[in-house]
Image (cartoon, grey):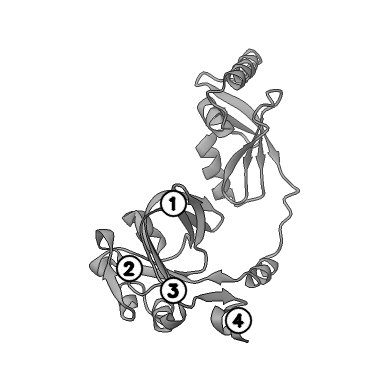
Amino acid sequence: MRVHLTSAGTITMRDAADFRRLDVLVDPQPCERLEQAIARIGRREGEDHVRLAAPVLRFLSGKAGDPEWESGFARMVEYAAKAGWVDAEGGIRAHITRNDADEVVSLDEFKAAMRALPAGISVITTGTGNTRAGMIVSSLTSISADPPLVGVFVNQGSSMHAVLLQNGSFVANVLGVEHGAVMSSFLGLPQGPTRFANGNWREGGGGLPVLDDALASLECEIVHTTSLGTHDMFVGKIRRTASRDASPVVHFNASTHCLSALAAS
């Protein structure tokens, strides 16, 4: 059983049914992020050990409630207790294993690869009245049809980040070739109502800003967030949609392209 604290900020479990060992694999990462991750699973004990909470291990395993797994887990905890590895609070002592083989590409290599990925362009909006806010993204992605879920990734330092967390809802407005002025406003103007100066905006459910002539608009309630590296993923359950036929635009190789124009050429 191995708890993995990844450099992306996620916490996962490997080999959940291997009760012969228990350790914490740590990817190279900033000290602050590592300490936050450790606090989510237990508490640090010196430089080389962590005290893990048994309920956290059961949750991370994804097997809690399975009779066979529960039996094996109980035997592991009993063995650890007899060996003196379980403290008075029930924390199980686990060794920290540092992952020195976490090889990743450079920032420049990452950007070069992502420039080769065509992606649709959307404006994410939230808030009402004078608290309206929005941003241009190419990270909108489909997650599930049942229930209907989409996701969008927002930099933790973005002006939209705190607003989305506060409001708990957003609209994903998919842009087309006629929305050049809308794109310019959201890319060039300060965050807030001024960004909505261009475009045919109306109020959707809860007063959220909806682009009336968007290729598609998806009004969403935020049902989950998770931190991944420098960004947070916001998962939205789609409550209302509207769509129409029009020519889309995509972001490719650091510029904007019209799909119909590319097809014609």
Mark 2, residue position = 210
Q: Nearer the viewer, mark 2 or mark 4?
A: 4
Asked if the residues shown at circle 2 and circle 4 are in contact, with their CB atoms under 8 angstroms apart, the answer is no
Disc 4 marks a residue whose amino acid type is Ala
Pair 2/1: label in front: 1
**Which kind of residue does numbered mark 1 sit on?**
Pro
Q: Mark 4 — residue?
A: 263
Q: Earlier in the sequence, mark 3 or mark 2?
A: 2
Q: Earlier in the sequence, mark 1 or mark 3?
A: 1
Residue wearing tag 1: 148
Helix, strand or loop for disc 2: strand
Q: CA distance from mark 4 to mark 1?
A: 31 Å
Select label 3 or label 2 by which is in front: 3
Judged by depth in the image, the label closer to the viewer, 4 or 1, is 4
Residue that protrudes farthest toward the right in the picture: 101
> In this view, which residue lies farthest toward the top?
82
Q: Nearer the viewer, mark 1 or mark 3?
A: 3
Residue 231 locus on image (x, y percent): 51, 58
Q: How would you rate the neighbour count of disc 2 (Cα within 10 Å): few for under 14, some for 14-19, many for 20 or more?
A: many
Q: Are marks 4 and 3 in contact (CB under 8 Å)?
A: no
Q: Which mark is residue 232?
A: none
Query: Which corner quadrant holds the N terminus?
Result: top right
Q: Depth check: 44 or 138 in front?
A: 138
Could you tell me which secondary element the residue under label 1 belongs to? Answer: strand
Instruction: Indicate the quadrant containing the C terminus: top left, top right, bottom left or bottom right.
Output: bottom right
74 to the left or right of 233? right
Image coordinates of residue 22 in percent, x first then y, are 67, 28
State the residue position of label 3: 245
